[in-house]
Image (cartoon, coloured by chain):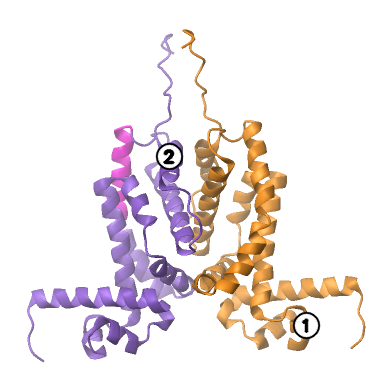
Chain colours: A purple, B orange
Amino acid sequence: MPKISEERKTERREQILAGARRCFAENGYEGATVARLEREIGLSRGAIFNYFPSKEDLFVELAVRDSARMSELWVEHGLDAVVREVVELDPDWLSVYLELFRRVRNDTEFRRRIEERNEAVIPANRARIEEAQRNGEFRDDLEAKEIGTFVNLVLNGLALLRASDEELPSTELVLALLRDAIGPRAPRRRPSRTGA
Amino acid sequence: MPKISEERKTERREQILAGARRCFAENGYEGATVARLEREIGLSRGAIFNYFPSKEDLFVELAVRDSARMSELWVEHGLDAVVREVVELDPDWLSVYLELFRRVRNDTEFRRRIEERNEAVIPANRARIEEAQRNGEFRDDLEAKEIGTFVNLVLNGLALLRASDEELPSTELVLALLRDAIGPRAPRRRPSRTGA
């Protein structure tokens, strides 16, 4: 086997992941056969499985990258940017997640792999929420974790509607209602004049 | 074929639907083979398909009943009751919906059947929201439809997290934040003393 540079390896990994994402989105997880993966990626099964030993590994890597990207987006550009991103996600790709739901639930090992990698992004998100609470962007009468789980809920709902091609509420409406739910309690109560 | 009473027919339909729901939940939609449906329902395929001509018909009827039940619950007992119901739904049954997402998206006829039946419950829900706006339970600065789509979003998010066995935010937290988002704008601004 010819030796290839680290740079070339990285390029290959990216080529494989991009092709696998397209192939999953187009054919579904079950429908993404090895032959279709080869065609879409433009490499032989030997080359592909040299980087990712199984189809499951391909999916886990793609799923984990999605989580990491959303988390980075939130940390760097705020929650509005994440909401705007979710409503633009590819419904075909989202439906691959849904297709795998039952499997993730019933396959402990598969589940553990995804959760373990996803949990890595939690501390940065938690810290970002706490910062937003300190600077008055989010309400401070709840735990950062509570705000995080509620936001997660809304984002999951958006993704599900997006995957179903159902009519989405406008992004502005979602952002406004989300701010009403987790934004600072306004108008703030003025400090009591009696000093109590 | 012996003639059977209307009452007996209704009983049979219910027996078939209850068995089909259990069978789908346990085996997934694809995994619910005709043999398994027969076993779980306790009737032969001939008897079952006399009432529901296909597996798809069974699923559509179950899905439509779920929507109708949620809608009734909202209309009769309010939104809190719906939220409490969603967080208690059977994750195995919810994952059948997810399994069918891709199919519903790609199969126009399947999709039309579900949407058509679901749309039947919209007017009652819309009227309920408008009533809640009039009596001060919900904010009145948004269209009833906007409130409906946001609530739908939150309920979908809850169902998705429930299906994944992910940690749900507490029901009380969801209800409190939902009220902050769609409840009356409080404290209301007092009318200006200058009359401006």
Q: How many marks?
A: 2
Can residue B113 be seen by looking at this rendering? yes
Q: Which residues are magenta?
A: A120-136
* Relative to B87, A142 lies left or right: left
List x then y, in percent, for residue A82: 33, 51
List x then y, in percent, for residue B124: 69, 48
Pinpoint the chain carrying mark 1: B
Question: Identity of the amino acid at label 2?
Answer: Ala
- Quadrant occupied by the N terminus of chain B: bottom right
Asked which secondary structure carries label 2, the reply is: helix
Q: Are marks 2 and 1 on the same chain?
A: no
* Relative to B141, A11 lies left or right: left
Residue placed at 53% from the left, 33% from the top? B141
Quick check: B61 above or below A33?
Answer: above
A126 in the magenta segment: yes
Pinpoint the chain carrying mark 2: A
Q: Quadrant of residue A23?
A: bottom left
- In this view, the residue in front, B111 or B17, is B111
List x then y, in percent, for residue B112: 60, 68
Residue placed at 34% from the left, 86% from the top? A36
**Residue designated by label 1:** B50
Asked which secondary structure carries label 1, the reply is: helix
**Residue designated by label 2:** A176
* Prevailing SS of the magenta stretch: helix
CA separation in Å, label 2 and label 1: 51 Å
Q: Which mark is residue B36?
A: none
Q: Quadrant of residue A196?
A: top left
Quick check: A139 above or below B86?
Answer: above
List x then y, in percent, for residue A7: 9, 74
Residue placed at 74% from the left, 83% from the top? B49
